[in-house]
């Protein structure tokens, strides 16, 4: 590892940049040798995360951009390196999801808008449509389902 930045009592403290042997880098705030505050992680594959960082990884807010060209972007809450809480994801395809997340999966109430502009608003479980929801076709037709929603 290579660190360039401020020190306090011989510890990384304040603004700095940490480069790992894997190619991952972090630039941002440190608190007595811990990554903590606001910062940016960058991976070799082009992905980057910008936002709140903490050793505990609890209830953080930030943006993760996937790929060198920013193919997909998630903005929202994180917990233990998972999308968790409220958040929005714009997929590489152009489809979007805005709603609740639980341990990295769509869970609870949310809205998915497909590239075709068809829209599903309703319940999700384990990342899939499940429970009551309304599927709105771009043509204006409505399809309402209560119970298990077919994928």
Image: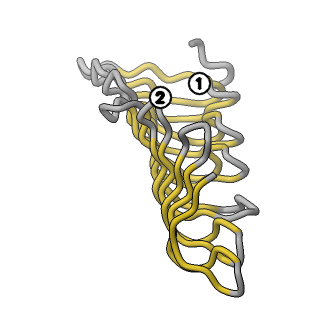
Residue at the (32%, 20%) spot, across then down = 137
Task: Give residue 86's position: percent from left, percent from top.
Answer: 56, 52
Q: Is residue 126 above or below residue 61?
A: above
Numbered circle sitting on residue 66: none
Which secondary structure, mark 2?
strand
- In the rendered structure, the answer to whether residue 94 lies left or right of residue 37 reads left
Task: Give residue 127's position: percent from left, percent from top.
Answer: 63, 27
Residue farthest right in this picture: 56
Task: Give residue 55's position: percent from left, percent from top.
Answer: 73, 63
Which secondary structure, mark 1?
strand
Give the class, few, some or many, for how many residues have Cα within 10 Å of label 2's Cα (few <14, many ≥20). some
Quadrant in the rendering for residue 24:
top right
Give the camera-side residue of 133 and 118: 118
Quadrant in the rendering for residue 132:
top right
For disc 1, the marked residue is 129
Give the class, few, some or many, for how many residues have Cα within 10 Å of label 1's Cα (few <14, many ≥20). many
Give the camera-side residue of 78 and 54: 54
Task: Give residue 11's position: percent from left, percent from top.
Answer: 70, 77
Residue farthest bottom in this picture: 9
Residue at the (26%, 22%) spot, across then down = 140
Q: How many marks?
A: 2
For disc 2, the marked residue is 134
Residue at the (33%, 35%) spot, across then down = 70
Instruction: State the CA–CA distance, disc 1 to disc 2.
Output: 10 Å
Quadrant in the rendering for residue 59:
bottom right
């Amino acid at each position: 590892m290579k660190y360039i930045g401020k020190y306090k009592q011989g510890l990384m403290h304040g603004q700095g940049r940490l480069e790992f042997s894997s190619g991952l880098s972090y630039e941002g705030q440190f608190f007595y040798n811990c990554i903590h505050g606001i910062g940016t992680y960058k991976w070799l594959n082009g992905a980057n995360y910008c936002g709140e960082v903490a050793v505990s990884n609890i209830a953080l807010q930030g943006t993760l951009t996937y790929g060198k060209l920013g193919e997909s972007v998630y903005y929202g809450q994180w917990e233990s390196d998972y999308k968790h809480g409220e958040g929005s994801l714009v997929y590489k395809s152009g489809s979007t999801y805005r709603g609740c997340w639980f341990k990295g999966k769509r869970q609870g109430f949310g809205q998915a808008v497909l590239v075709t502009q068809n829209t599903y608003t309703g319940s999700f479980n384990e990342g899939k449509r499940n429970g009551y929801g309304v599927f709105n076709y771009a043509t204006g037709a409505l399809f309402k389902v209560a119970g298990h929603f077919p994928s």
